[in-house]
Image (cartoon, grey):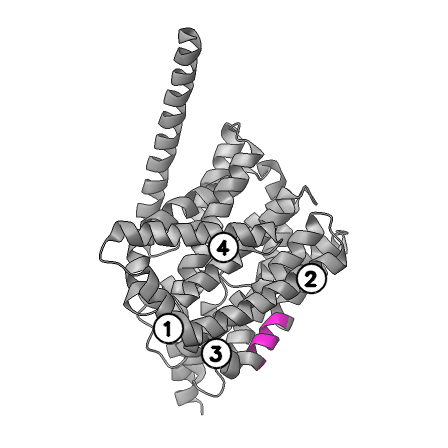
Amino acid sequence: MPALLAVVSRDFAWLFVEVGVLLLALAVLARVARRTGFSPIPLYLVAGLVIAGLTPPEVSARTVAIESQIAVVLLLFMLGLEYTGQEISASLRAGLRSGIADLVFNFTPGLVLGLVLGWSPLEAVVLGGVTYISSSSITAKGLDDLDRLGNRETPAILSILVIEDLAMAPYLPLVAVLLAGGSVLAGLLSAGLAVAAVAVALWVALYHGHRISRGISHASDEVVVLTVVGLLLVFSGGAEALQLSGAVVAFLLGLAISGALAERTRQLFGPLRDLFAAFFFVLFGLQIDIHQVPDVALAAAALFLVTALTKFATGWVATRKTSGVPGRIRAGTALIARGEFSIVIAGLAVAAGRESSIGALAATYVLISAIVGPLLMRYAVDLAHLVALVRRRHP
């Protein structure tokens, strides 16, 4: 027994060292991202790909699934904190047409490419989801960093992001059930329950969010953290048991928290979210066969070019009544980057053992968009000024 304990102790010691080295490496990447003003997501993905290519670690599928689920729940919960029920309701009323155009413009390219590549219709639908949804975290961070939150085009941008996030409520459970081998009827039932849950949550957030916030609020940060974590686990776990999306339920819980408590919760959970999100993107990179990336690089680049144009068109259409040409250019470039949700969607297919190249294609596609998107967003101002100058000289 002492010998066994010694072996276990050594295993844990090396595990701690490996995790510590990984965290320090991620800290360096986060510093680089902070210094350059870009999202750290592509850097974390690259780290996972590099580790997988050099020394593939032995990580159990169960560990990956648990850690990924925790990360996704935290990501979506924090995203829900960014909105109020009133904002969601207003966004649905004002941006529904633009949201429909966004769906048609950006879901179609992924769907078509999946079919062209010879994938099954379900796998093509997964790729359509990957290309459809913009990265809320990258876009929101860019708007904040570039001091554009007060711009006239920003409400339209946020409206598109909100509608995309809500669209994930029926999409994720439907796709998850079908990928797991469930019937279409079971998938539709799961999606219907998710839509009903969204409707109830919106009603609660609009009319009873203040009561929920008052029930959670406490002078002690410890009490607030324990209460919120407990609610997240209970509701997300219960949703998964009912074959609903725990991530969407987490988003709705964040939506129900309002006022000063929402800001306090962001401060308390921000570091924890960042930690698990970093692991999530690295773990996703670890699951990708790096040798497949060159094979899908051309398809990923072509897909990015097409969907960069379609996202730009989405932003242009969404702001045509509220902004001039410079504002439309800024809106179009703000929506180009894909990120966390695209990886989540592709992760469902990877976990289900579907088409082996879907993970590599999605990771490469997200990597390109997460790098180029913020660049285009940053220099959209210069492009807008150039267009305005040309229009003044040649009316």
From which residue to which does the magenta span run? 97-103
Name the secondary structure under disc 3. helix
Which image quadrant for residue 20? top left
Q: What residue type is labelled 3?
A: Ser
**Mark 4 highlights which residue?**
235
* Sequence-first tag of 4 and 3: 3
**Mark 4 neighbour density, 10 Å: few (under 14) some (14–19) many (20 or more):** some
Compared with 200, 79 (above or below) is above
Residue shown at the point (70%, 58%) measured from the top left? 187
Q: Is residue 5 magenta?
A: no
**Mark 2 neighbour density, 10 Å: few (under 14) some (14–19) many (20 or more):** some
Q: Which amino acid does label 1 sit on?
A: Val
**Mark 1 highlights which residue?**
381
* Label of residue 309 in the image: none
* Sequence-first tag of 1 and 2: 2
Do tag 3 and tag 2 residues touch (Cβ < 8 Å)? Answer: no
Instruction: Name the foreground residue: 166 vs 192.
Output: 192
**Mark 3 highlights which residue?**
89
> Gap in Å between the C-alphas at discs 4 and 3?
23 Å
The quadrant in which the N terminus is found is top left
The kind of secondary structure the magenta stretch mainly shows is helix
Q: Percent x, y for residue 121? A: 75, 56
Q: Percent x, y for residue 261? A: 30, 64
Is label 1 or label 2 in front? Answer: 2
> Gap in Å between the C-alphas at discs 4 and 1?
43 Å
